[in-house]
Image (cartoon, rainbow, N blue to C red):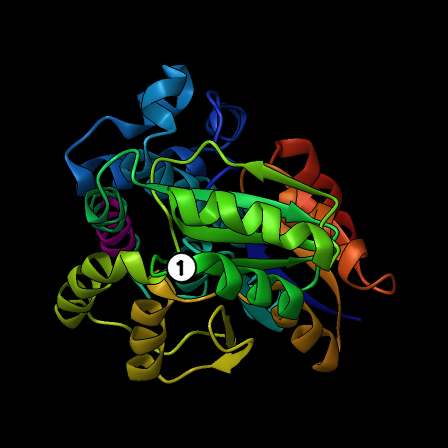
Amino acid sequence: MSRAFVFPGQGSQAVGMGADLAGAFQTARDVFQEVDEALKQNLSKLMREGPESEITLTENAQPALMAVSVAVVRILEKDGRKPLPALASHVAGHSLGEYSALVAAGALHLADGARLLKLRGQSMQKAVPVGEGAMAALLGIELEPAREACREAALGEVVAVANDNGGGQIVVSGHKAAVERAIEAAKPRGSKRGILLPVSAPFHCPLMQPAADAMQAALDQVTLGTPQVPLVANVLASEVTNPAEIKQRLVEQVTGLVRWRESVLYMKSAGVLALIECGAGKILSGLVKRIDKEMSGTALNTPADIEAFLKTA
């Protein structure tokens, strides 16, 4: 049975993230130290102690989530003596998790990944003044009806599908009033409930174009290698290995739809039946069964999780 390693996006952060890994493994402490040095910031202390208001800031949450994800993979490789290609046939990440996937697969240096995500978080925050944008989760609706609801609700403003998470969970993003209209427009199209999300900016919609431009300039300055296993890109829901194309897809991803449901189904079509979520939280491993009942999801975020996984790997 083939496995894929998947990496969480924003929303999985929490005070204390990575603390037990750092307590148990020098490998994790080394990863956190390298990220701290790259950012010239004591991010590991913030991850360990909070406050929550600081760790949830986009510019901190993004590199912090990557640090924990990479720590898990490095522990498997160094302490478990299992190289990534022996453990997984593909990597994929939800939004910022795509950067974690590229570092894990050896295509992007850890320090570069940390700096890129810091900039990505800052640029996304600056792209839209606070209060002007919003995101909402629509529950019980599929992709095409949600797109129809967005078209009806726009009325000259921006509102677009940001995430197709699967299992009838769609996230929309854009101008706050348009997002609120989309919640209402989605109801006759199957949405059971619409929930405004506690986010600081409207990610993955055309309002993020200034952030996409900033990432284009930053990625042009970074060396990207070929990943050890193929990356399943958010915006394609199919695999890429060419470094120039990966950069292009990372830029498109800032304003584009995270096609997570389709990405999971693509991995299944490539023979993957088990998704191993590396890092904080259990969101992606929890979504798997809702997307395809034949697939399984396992979260690795504690020393005990890693130890149990290595016994079966």
Q: Is residue 35 shown above or below 240?
A: above
Question: Where residue 16 appears, x then y in whole percent?
Answer: 48, 21
- The residue at the point 46 percent across, 72 percent down is 235
Q: Considering depth in this image, is 198 or 51 the residue closer to the camera?
A: 198
The residue type indicated by label 1 comes to: Leu
Q: Quadrant of residue 43?
A: top left
The residue tagged with tag 1: helix, strand or loop?
loop
Question: Where residue 32 appears, x then y in whole percent?
Answer: 34, 36
* Magenta stretch: dominant secondary structure: helix
Dot 1 corresponds to which residue? Answer: 155
Q: Quadrant of residue 84?
A: bottom right
Magenta stretch, residue numbers:
111-118
Is residue 94 at all visible to an observer of this figure? yes
Question: Where residue 55 appears, x then y in whole percent?
Answer: 36, 26
- The residue at the point 24 percent across, 51 percent down is 111
Is residue 310 at all visible to an observer of this figure? no
Q: In this image, 263 relative to 134: left or right?
A: right
Q: Considering depth in this image, is 271 or 262 the residue closer to the camera?
A: 262
